[in-house]
Amino acid sequence: MPDKRVGLFGARKKLEQVEAELRQANERERRLQEQLQKAGRRYDELRGKDAITVENEIADARRVLAGIVGEAESQRAASAQRQAEAAAELARVGQRIDSAQGELQGIRTQIVETQEIALLQEAGIYEYRHRLADSVAYKTSLERLKDSIKLSAKNNHAVTATTNWTVNNSAVEGQRMVRDFSKLMLRAYNTEADNCVRSMRPHRLESSKDRLNKTRDIISRLGKTMHIQISAGYHRLRLEELDLTADYLAKVDEEKERVRVERERQRDEAQAQREFEREKARLAKEQSHWRTAMAKWTDAGNAAKIAEAESKLGQIDDAIRNVEEQAANVRTGWVYVISNVGSFGPDMVKIGLTRRLDPTERVRELGDASVPFKFDVHALIFDADAVSLETRLHQHLAGQRVNRVNLRREFFHVTPAQVLEVLRAMGLQDNLVDYVEEPEAEEWRSSRRMAEGVPAA
């Protein structure tokens, strides 16, 4: 029987066809069994008839039975043959599947993962390949490395190739051809390397290096007949360029974040100083008024009013000293615990520091247009060394940090009640000026009610 081959995706259909044929054969066998039983019953009926008639009918019955048995054997043989063919075809399909899977695996080894989401999901905390002081040092090292890359290419150290290639029995023509092909291969390699540098982000480093390694392998395969390949030394220089570029970009981002935080701190400090000056001016003006009034009451001999003025002036003097001390001590201030349920969800607070006279002014600034809802204040803690207090709170809650990479982001997965427990454990509950456990979140709650009242489209 000729070899009936089917495609990889037609194997299932072929097997289903064989199974249908087997079911038909089983049905025919069942009918033959019924006929055999019927013949047996007929034999019993003939047992009472005369010998000649019985013999004739028995002979006829035996012939019918022999035919039935022969047909059944033929059906069994055909079914067995079809089963064998199906098993052989299934084995061939399995071999082709294994071969296709091997080819697929080989292709996958040549693919470089470049999808941004996949790369970001695999990205962890960035580790610098070269530990330098700042972005300027990285940029200087990059410039020196690029000079080395240019010098290596200029001195023909970037590509290696055969030296005994001939064209039309001419060694000169052969060398010219090898040189031209080497330049072409080097240009393709450098184009790929430059693209990797231009599109570099720290989380893409390993993908870019893998991409450049495979580019070098492809060039080696294409230039195999002339033994053309990118030299190991030149390839190392370009890989180091990728490392330094990623380090430089990561350091720039780190410095930008540090500058942003420092500018924010300076703005808060400048605003606090302006508030101190305004408060001192207000108190000085009030002090002047009371002194003028006291002079008039002294001339009038009003002892009660003089005593009131002296008491008030004493309070003003204390207030002026407090403002001056707070302005002079850069560590004195307020630690605030705030939340924004509508923006960040429940059980998340921000713990920050401000030196403002009114800390709620700073909280109002944080709830600007960058977040959909304003922040709610849960706790205000005044301390002579608010900087240390903030640091200690952050250390106690380090395990609940939201952003564990950038520690300048001061959000924590805790509730206000848990923060209060930490303050009690630190013995600072008496420093609490204000404490509210449940956020008001008026805008967010009103927005939810309005959204629930809107009919579905």
Image (tube, grey):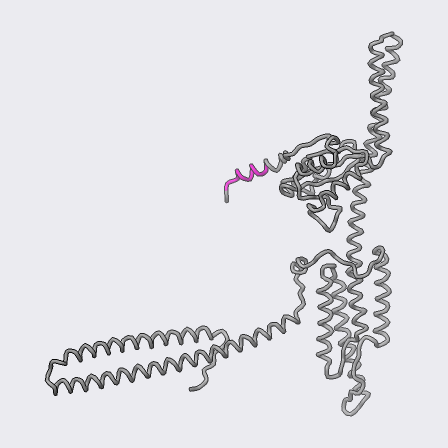
Q: Which quadrant holds residue 315?
A: top right
Q: Looking at this rendering, what residue extends furthest in the top direction?
A: 301
Magenta-tinted stretch: 446-455
Position of residue 312 measured from the top left corner of the image (x, y, whole percent) = 82, 18
**Near-viewer residue (38 or 445):** 38
Q: Does 309 sit left or right of 126 as displayed?
A: right
Q: Does 43 sit left or right of 316 as displayed?
A: left
- The number of numbered discs placed on residues in the rendered structure image is 0
Q: Is residue 207 magenta?
A: no
Position of residue 22 measured from the top left corner of the image (x, y, whole percent) = 37, 76
Question: Which residue is found at the position 76% from the left and 91% from the top?
Answer: 168
Q: Looking at this rendering, what residue extends furthest in the left direction?
A: 50
**Near-viewer residue (117 or 180):** 117
Q: Looking at this rendering, what residue extends furthest in the bottom direction?
A: 169
Residue 355 visible in this rendered orientation of the protein: yes
Say if 357 sits above or below 29 in the image.
Answer: above
Q: Which quadrant holds residue 361?
A: top right
Specify the quadrant that holds the N terminus: bottom left
Position of residue 346 measured from the top left corner of the image (x, y, whole percent) = 62, 41
Magenta: main secondary structure equals helix
Question: Which residue is found at the position 64% from the left and 42% from the top?
Answer: 343
Q: Does 71 sit left or right of 57 as displayed?
A: right
Say if 252 sits above or below 337 in the image.
Answer: below
Say if 238 sits above or below 183 in the image.
Answer: above
Residue 363 visible in this rendered orientation of the protein: no
Position of residue 221 measured from the top left corner of the image (x, y, whole percent) = 71, 79
Say if 264 sits above or below 153 in the image.
Answer: above
Q: Is residue 448 magenta?
A: yes
